[in-house]
Image: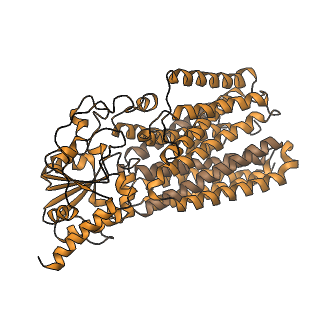
Chain colours: A orange, B brown
Amino acid sequence: MSVQPQFVIDASYFAAAFLFIYGLKRMSSPVTARSGIVVAGVGMLVATLASFLYYFGVTEAAQPHLGTNVVLALVALVLGTLWAWWSGKRVAMTAMPQMVALYNGMGGGAAAAIAAVEFLRTSAEHQTVPLVLAVLGALIGSVSLSGSLIAWAKLDGRINKTWRYPGQQLVNGVLFLATLALGVYIVFVAHGHAPAALVAAFFGAALVFGVLMTMPIGGADMPVVISLYNAFTGLAVGFEGYVLQNPALMIAGMVVGSAGTLLTLLMAKAMNRSVSNVIFSNFGASDAGADGEIKGTQKPAEASDAAIQMRYANKVIIAPGYGLAVAQAQHKLYEFVKLLVDAGVEVKFAIHPVAGRMPGHMNVLLAEAGVPYDMIYDLEDINDEFKEADVAVVIGANDTVNPAARTNKNSPIYGMPILNVDQAKQVYVIKRGQGKGYSGVENELFYADNTNLVYGDAQKVMVAMIQAVKSLEGGGH
Amino acid sequence: MDLTTTLTGFVALYIFMLAAFTGYEIIGRVPAILHTPLMSGSNFVHGIVVVGAMYALLNATSLVEQVIGFVGVLLGAGNAAGGYVVTERMLEMFKPSNKAGEGGK
């Protein structure tokens, strides 16, 4: 084994670790974010290319297979990269969360695969500490893989049912303990030389556990779950990095593990729920229908009337939700906003922390339409301004503007921070029909005295609003 | 373990601890508008797992190990490449208002 290739590998990994951290740091400000991902990308490229130098340092036993292995590695790299590149370029911005889930699951799977190869290497001498970490990484990585796939399928609308039955927690608990027992057996009884069938059973149980754990979680909670699995994969990668004595994996994995955990907590907090609550309880399952009596009626309004009132308002605040993006109306919305701004109206966007499908998702969707980020305000920064606003416009949002979260203790969303749109002088709600929100809760905002509803596809409504304002300028009424 | 094990015990613990604090510090001060791109960005960073999978595959000695190693590299490469493309597409769109004409205020 020559020394030089190993030195190049080590140096590249050091460079990669530096570039990852520096890149993530740059990603944490909107001004430098774009360059951050490029910096981190260079790190990945350097580390991957350097890894081919393992060619010069493989074990005796692997020498006869080296040619095949290199070809296999190249094919796998090219196939994986091409597929992911193609799918990543193609995916719509609205579908971003499930795509992140999918890529994340793949990372978890890769970490599990590393552990699997390690367990199968019966010739090697195994030490206890690396084995423990290998088993933990394998368990977490497998759960992350199958769990992320379920999360992807749910957000992508491929699975609509939340699958629940009595005693579910017990079944999941037993399965988890069984998986853990198999892991303990691999480490402390078999000392890493367990029969292949047992290793397979361990991975199978971990994968099934990931599925069972994710199935009962509702779609509204999926972003938190995806973020959690992102942290899981990071941990798994870090642990397998220890097994392989690879500092790049250890550092990158642990950075993501802790960053992902914090992000998960922030998301859960934004929804006013604890992470354990998300995973172990059933959101809005029991009493969604029990909040019946709401006084008042829903009052419809014409798009053109709403538009003209906004044209002559001093201050308009827009609260967009996922429905805006589903209707692909964000471009038309910004066109309308530009007309208002030209007419001297002060327009701001108010973003709820969980608007869209993940924190920050709505910002991405608005950015896609060209809305500058300094027109966009977080909930804490803008909530006191609604009472000064002449018009508040709700587009494709529902639960995030439901006053029941403030007032109705029986409501499943009680306690969640909401945008105070109901405090504006006039509220317009643009929505497709009379349906309920993602949580299935009735929204009393729609029945309030100062609320009018503009029914219709968000994109068509925006077109009508643009025409109304334009005809006002041009037609000379 | 076939490698010379040097990153064991407390050295490894130090690495894990410092890396964990680094991750915490990076995310802790991030505005909410960047949460989704950052989650995606951190998702890209753990794509480095592909490097570990390559080590496993290059050292494979049997067909089973080759198959698992192949799947590992395939998945890891997907994680890295997909994470990169998706993150870059999102971050590309963040622009301040002076670039986009007359702004809000």
The residue under the point 26% across, 36% down is: A405
The relative height of residue A383 versus residue A27 in the rendered view (above or below) is above
Task: Name the outermost residue toward the right.
Answer: A64
Whole-percent x, y for residue A272 in the image: 33, 35
The relative height of residue A36 versus residue B67 in the rendered view (above or below) is below
Q: Is residue A238 visible?
A: no
Q: Tally the numbered discs.
A: 0
The residue under the point 37% across, 43% down is: A438
Depth check, front residue: A197 or A41: A197
Q: Quadrant of the C terminus of chain A?
A: bottom left
Depth check, front residue: A319 or A304: A304
The residue under the point 63% across, 51% down is: A13
Q: Is residue A22 visible?
A: yes
As drawn, is A261 to the left or to the right of A385? Answer: right
**Residue A417, image quadrant:** top left
**Residue A471, image quadrant:** bottom left
Depth check, front residue: A163 or A41: A163
Whole-percent x, y for residue A87 in the image: 57, 58
Whole-percent x, y for residue B16 in the image: 55, 37
Whole-percent x, y for residue A454 in the image: 24, 56
